[in-house]
Image: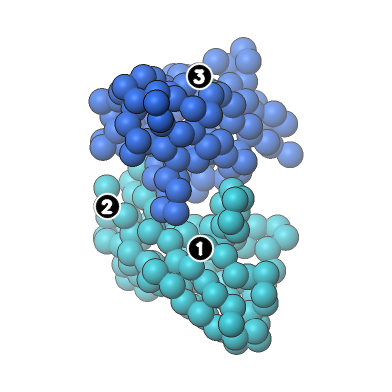
Chain colours: A cyan, B blue
Amino acid sequence: QSALTQPRSVSGSPGQSVTISCTGTSSDVGGYNYVSWYQQHPGKAPKLMIYDVSKRPSGVPDRFSGSKSGNTASLTISGLQAEDEADYYCCSYAGSYTDVVFGGGTKLTVL
Amino acid sequence: QLQLQESGPGLVKPSETLSLTCTVSGGSISSSSYYWGWIRQPPGKGLEWIGSIYYSGSTYYNPSLKSRVTISVDTSKNQFSLKLSSVTAADTAVYYCARHGTEPDPWGQGTLVTVSS
């Protein structure tokens, strides 16, 4: 059960778009359409932003979108806003509900 | 809506056992569609899944922690609990409880547990 690989940091200016990648293997990201993404502000619990690769929970702006190709999933945030500055974590189902693997996290800086 | 709340000591001595409880409100822990899990986050670091339990009592643990972890459930109180034995400073972290199917959600607010003498 190895962690998924994410870039340590990404940045963008307000109004721009950024994409965060999440690379796993055929045993997790590539094997199932169950990738989720979480936003975490300092001192707060992670908030679900994307589930099942590309679905958005109620209340999450449509500026947030998810996709997957092979063993790599991606989170794209368009129309960057200051409040999007946070840490983002990907998570993948890996064969059972009890097999949960996270990415190492990506710090998004809004310039 | 479903809410989870962690509780337990914020300070544990090295070599002792860390004990936390997660209280579920707004829904039943006996739901057949979900597992209930513990996830931790050391200061400044990423998320690590610790383990999960089904309402029937079936447990599943992260292999790296399996020898020290026990998760239990009390359906009458709508709670599940975590015990982590022989703790060291490396176990200092914010501990979260969460419901999960194919993804953990929702999460509790988290509780910081510091291992120090």
- Name the kind of residue labelled 3 in the image: Val
Residue B21 percent location from the top left of the image = 55, 23
Q: Secondary structure at mark 2?
A: loop
- Crowd rating for badge 1 (residues with CA inside 10 Å; few <14, some 14–19, many 20+): many
Foreground of the two, B64 or B14: B14
Frontmost of labels 2 and 1 is: 1
Residue B15 percent location from the top left of the image = 31, 22
Foreground of the two, A85 or A76: A85
Q: In the drawing, what numbered circle is on residue A69?
A: none
Q: Is residue A82 left or right of residue B95?
A: right
Going from the N terminus, do you reach mark 2 or mark 1 first? 2
> What's the CA distance linking mark 3 and mark 1?
30 Å
Residue in view at x 60 percent, y 86 percent: A13
Q: Secondary structure at mark 3?
A: strand
Q: In the drawing, what numbered circle is on residue B73?
A: 3
- Name the kind of residue labelled 1 in the image: Tyr
Frontmost of labels 3 and 1 is: 1
Q: In the drawing, what numbered circle is on residue A88?
A: 1
- Crowd rating for badge 3 (residues with CA inside 10 Å; few <14, some 14–19, many 20+): many
Residue A9 percent location from the top left of the image = 43, 72
Q: Secondary structure at mark 1?
A: strand
> What's the CA distance linking mark 3 and mark 2?
28 Å
Q: Is residue B64 left or right of residue A84?
A: left
Foreground of the two, B107 or B100: B107
Q: In the drawing, what numbered circle is on residue A2?
A: 2
> What's the CA distance linking mark 2 and mark 1?
18 Å
